Image (cartoon, rainbow, N blue to C red):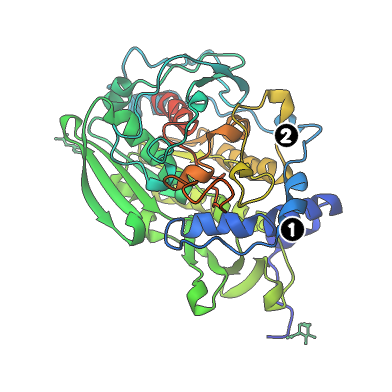
Amino acid sequence: MGTNFPQSHHLQTTHLSLPRKQFLSYVLYALLPLALLHYLLFNPLAAPKPPLLAQPQAREAAPSQHRHAPVNALEEQLPPPPPAPGRGGEALGETQGGDVSASGSASPPCDYSDGEWVPDARPPLYDGTSCGTIKDGQNCMAHGRPDTGYLHWRWRPRRCDLPAFSPEAFLRWLRNRHLAFVGDSMARNQGESLLCLLASRSRPDLVYRDGEENRFRRWVFREHNATVSIFWSPLLVRVAEKAEHAGVRHNNVFLDSFDERWMSRLGGIDAAVLSVGHWFLIPGVYHDGGRVVGCHDCADLNRTETAFFGAFKEAVRRTLAEVARRHGADSKLVAVTTFSPAHFEGDWDKAGACPRRHPYREDEKGLGYTEKEMRRTVLEAVAAHAGAGPLRFAALDVTRLANLRPDGHPGPYMRSDPFAGGPDARVQNDCVHWCMPGPIDTFNEILLQTVAG
Ligand SMILES: *[C@@H]1O[C@H](CO)[C@@H](O)[C@H](O)[C@H]1NC(C)=O
Ligand SMILES: *[C@@H]1O[C@H](CO)[C@@H](O)[C@H](O)[C@H]1NC(C)=O
């Protein structure tokens, strides 16, 4: 196909509005370390060989990806968080316990996104052996990660308190309810973290699983008639996933077609946590109304790069609008987890791809352009539905707290005993997902406050 394809207004606007420097910055972010990211996200355990990634490119990519953002003007531009709706509390919290801090209707809700990591001597609620639902690649303890300092930090919001996770309070809320995690492997990571946290008090039974790598699963805590499920939907909307073995290296993303594998199930779900982002960074062709309206990392298709931001925005915005259209009268919570940054630095195949062993201080590490844009898209899409009715939308704004945790990823411990081949052996690193236990447990501390709010 040699002709230019039409671009939708949204995508074109997004593309054209990018200043050149920022454009270069995200192109570097997107094209270089993403070969590896892409590999991790797509099929973390299937193939033992490392991805092909040119070394000089990897070295170039790191500084641009980790460049400090000098000024974070984002906060000022964002609308204030939606007020805690009175009706939501009644609808969702009739069994709410006293140890869940409920924000009174007079006081503004806490901004958990702004804070710092402080030392915390308490042990995690679970470990690498006490929980049966840790995906192998995230079980850092079982894989022999020797340091344990990353387990002993707690997130302290600047202006309020984030209570420690209470499995009892969460299970009380979850009684007779169904909570679903929907999204990519970060959604799975967060869902498994919650299961492990809850399993420290009550045993979940896996009652359903389906799909390659168990992409669809459901557990029941029988003592509580409480259900947790995980739905694979890496772009929220319908996608024909790439198939490299068949020569298809792009995801074909259909922005006007909902992923009914989860969308059609929402009627029986009381709360859904949507978590997507990283899959938009890998090569994609975007379809809308039967036409191709854009693509990302698509030079091989002789098409103009439009970036992925517009597609991400459309997918999130249209998905929330459709949920509101179908379920506006239902008492339901839809929470959207904001973008969770990766922390690759240096050579991908050395032990030190994410070598830091301490959190960053707040002033040490600002958000990069991609992280800011992805976060803002979610916050704006959620704010657009604030206070609309019994259906409640919320953002789980974890981008900044996650950005400060380069120490929380599996790194080489995505595999067991990674240095068995000697200290100089090439190893693959996962600097995207989170060790369990680890910083992702904090996402669920915020989720507890959100469901109870
Ligand atoms: C790429 O697109 C341009 C303009 O649409 C066209 O002139 C050119 O022949 C195309 N190249 C290939 C290899 O298809
Ligand atoms: C058990 O929980 C489900 C939601 O997952 C709910 O539909 C059902 O009514 C509950 N059963 C009882 C007996 O309350």
- Return the residue found at the far left: 223
Would residue 314 be seen by someone viewing this image from the given angle? no
Q: Residue at x 48, y 16 (%)?
A: 105
212 above or below 319? below
Q: Position of residue 118 (x, y in %)?
A: 57, 16
17 above or below 102? below
**Amino acid tagged 1:** Gln
281 above or below 377? below
Which quadrant of the render holds ligand 2? top left
Tell me the element at label 1. helix
The residue closer to the viewer here, 328 or 416, is 416
Q: Which mark is residue 74?
A: 2
Circle 2 residues within 10 Å: few <14, some 14–19, many ≥20: few
Q: Position of residue 98 (x, y in %)?
A: 33, 12
In which quadrant of the rendered image does the N terminus lie?
bottom right
The residue closer to the viewer here, 292 or 2, is 2
